[in-house]
Amino acid sequence: MILIFDYFETLLNSKSMDFNRGLKIFWEKYYKDKCKFEDIKTYGEELFQVLMSRHAEWKEFPFVEEELPLYAEKFGGEVVSMDAEEEADFLMACNEFEINPGIEDLLKESEQRNIPMYVLSNSGFRAEALLIILNRKGLGKYFKGIWSSADFGRTKPCKEFFELAIQSALADNPSEKRENIVYIGDLYETDVIGAYNAGIKVAWLNKKGEEDTKKLATYKTATTNEIKEKLF
């Protein structure tokens, strides 16, 4: 067996999310002498609409590569260059993360069973930054690899994005087969449909009690503990 996890609301829950919390710190450090915070906040809202339109086409809007240069173009100055640590700091300023209840038990049990684990995430933030946050939460050690749509350029449910993870995981574990891969995620449109179309099993962490209208989920659970029970 190989397990591939979604990131947000599967590994880590966001207790609260406000992009402007991160943007305020960013403004104070780089743009305070160039514009008012309300100006950069308004522009950030415009760029959010760009992100949403990209996602509607399964395309990503990478924060460091594409969004940061637009702030420099709009307000002047050099393009801000963030390393992965700074990018992780920004994301954590925007989100108050907590570990999804039960996820540590699932990861520990999988590790004890020598099951290789990976992460495939829709995120405008690079995989390296996402891994830093997992490390800060004590979860990074469980994963052999992590892929972010910020690096790939396209988002789930894009079949090619899933295929990147699938082929990489199979190359790491040549004794395993595609039919032994299980993807674990919480969103029907991106996680369930995407994994199904990629030809792998999917454990749907169905927190909202939605209907599996297309009957695509291999396993449907309300909690992470139930996933462990179904897998093992």
Image (cartoon, helix red, strand yellow):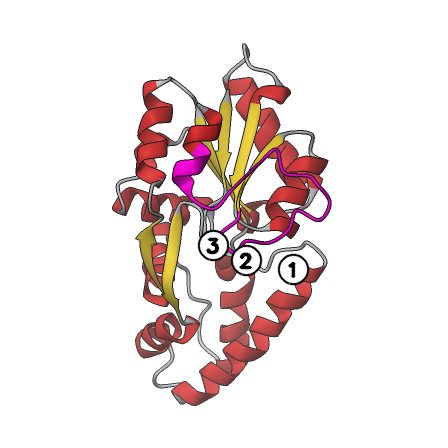
Q: Would residue 154 be seen by someone viewing this image from the given angle?
A: no
Tell me, for residue 125, which label it has, or none: 3
Earlier in the chain: of badge 2 and badge 3, it is: 2
Looking at the image, residue 28 lies above or below residue 185? below
- The type of residue carrying mark 2 is Pro
- The type of residue carrying mark 3 is Phe
Nearest the eye: 151 or 220: 220
Splitting the image into 4 quarters, where does residue 109 fall? top left
Q: Residues within 10 Å of mark 1 (few under 14, many from 20)?
A: some
Magenta span main SS: loop
Q: Residues within 10 Å of mark 2 (few under 14, many from 20)?
A: many
- Asked if disc 2 and disc 3 are in contact, CB closer than 8 Å, the reply is yes
Earlier in the chain: of badge 1 and badge 3, it is: 1
Nearest the eye: 23 or 220: 220
The Cα atoms of the two marked residues, 2 and 3, are separated by: 6 Å
Residue drawn at x 51%, y 53% is: 123
